[in-house]
Amino acid sequence: VAIGIARETAPGERRVALTPETCKKFIAAGADVRIERDAGMRAGFPDSAYADAGARIVDDADAAVGDADIALCVQPPSPERIARLKSGGVLIGILQPQADAARGDAIVARQLVAFPLERLPRTTRAQAMDVLSSQAGMAGYKAVLIAAQLAPRFFPMLTTAAGTIRPSRVLIVGAGVAGLQAIATAKRLGAQVEGFDVRPETREQIESLGGKFLDLGVSAAGEGGYARQLTDEERAEQQRRLAEHLKLVDVVVCTAAVPGRPAPKIVTAAMVDGMKPGSVIVDLAAETGGNCERTQPGETIEAGGVIVAGPLNLASMGALHASEMYARNVYNFASLLLKDGALAFDWNDELLARSVWPERAPA
Ligand code: NAD
């Protein structure tokens, strides 16, 4: 089985879908690996490390993935690149085939067996392949560091000769994978941390990290361990209580999401206007429109003395560890397709059957 990795081409993308570690594992499993020159460089993995791991370093993307049985990527390749992949081959990555019709069409036209890893069911068995979780962890971590950098204050309490400094009050909106990592990170920096979520089970998770659960009186657990969209009344209640609370907070990190929908708008423009000057909002949901009405994706703005940042692709900022985790997720998934050094699809395996795109009828 030939496995190929082309350099990522999305602007600002530093991650890579194969590391020297997973390269070794693929080769031990009988695969032949080719990787485009410098594909891992921006994540901290030089060509020499891949060569030592047994990969062939090739000069261009065509040589890497043009006749690969399995092409690995982080971000979806362009429709042009997809059209040059091996017909009938396997493509594994965060592919979001429905987000861009041209891309989806290209996958179909090329008769690829595509596995958008974001479609994996979030079952216990799939945890080792869960790219949403591994990348969200890095994003939550970086979001807090950005907030700490933008804030005109210390996070920890300090007792100094120049007097006592009070710790920053940090509120994390949404306590999923990214939010919990954000809480843990803000806590390590010494801040006073609160978090809230609409899933009631997050109370215990927030508290176990040393955070305080902010009760806004709304509970909206949905299917599959995710949140559901709030009703208008629930949203109004959440907003009324939150508006009061935000007047006391120094830093807000937003991480709330509902699968398949634009990010819920939780922090309104009026709430931002009510915050103290010098407050900071970092909106990790900027990618899907933002949890804050003032967020401008990809920008950092100031509104009435409040700094609002909407950074994109935070996982790429921590490209080395994000790639290490991502590549392991990918290896664990690809292993399901490799039997005795050859490609084999077990469509009775729900991880394959439920993630493959285009969807196929149950076997
Ligand atoms: P996500 O990125 O879809 O959402 C982030 C958080 O935003 C969620 O916790 C959600 O409840 C919250 N949220 C949505 N609307 C909100 C609102 N109006 N106000 C406040 N918060 C709101 O979710 P995620 O982080 O990918 O995962 C969420 C859940 O899935 C977690 O329980 C996580 O433990 C679980 N999970 C399970 C597995 C597994 O078992 N394999 C893997 C990953 C995640």
Image (tube, rainbow, N blue to C red):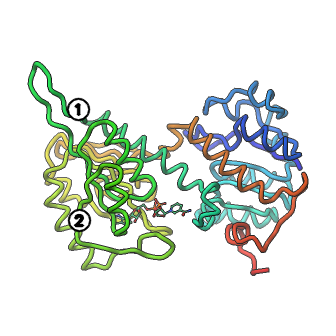
Q: Where residue 18 appears, x then y in whole percent?
A: 71, 41
- Alpha carbon of mark 2 to alpha carbon of mark 1: how far? 26 Å
Secondary structure of the residue carrying numbered label 2: loop
- Identity, as a three-letter code, of the amino acid under mark 2: Asp
Q: Nearer the viewer, mark 2 or mark 1?
A: 2
Q: Is residue 228 above or below residue 9?
A: below
Other-residue count near label 2 (Cα within 10 Å), few / some / many at <14 / 14–19 / ≥20? some
Q: Residue at x 84, y 56 (%)?
A: 338
Mark carried by residue 255: none
Q: Is residue 270 above or below residue 63?
A: below
Q: Where residue 298 appears, x then y in whole percent?
A: 42, 45
Mark carried by residue 154: 1
Other-residue count near label 1 (Cα within 10 Å), few / some / many at <14 / 14–19 / ≥20? some
* Residue beneath disc 2: 215
Q: Report the residue that reaches farthest toward the left.
A: 163
Secondary structure of the residue carrying numbered label 1: loop
Q: Nearer the viewer, residue 347 or 310?
A: 347
Q: Where residue 352 appears, x then y in whole percent?
A: 73, 67
Q: Quadrant of residue 174?
A: bottom left
Q: Quadrant of residue 120?
A: bottom right
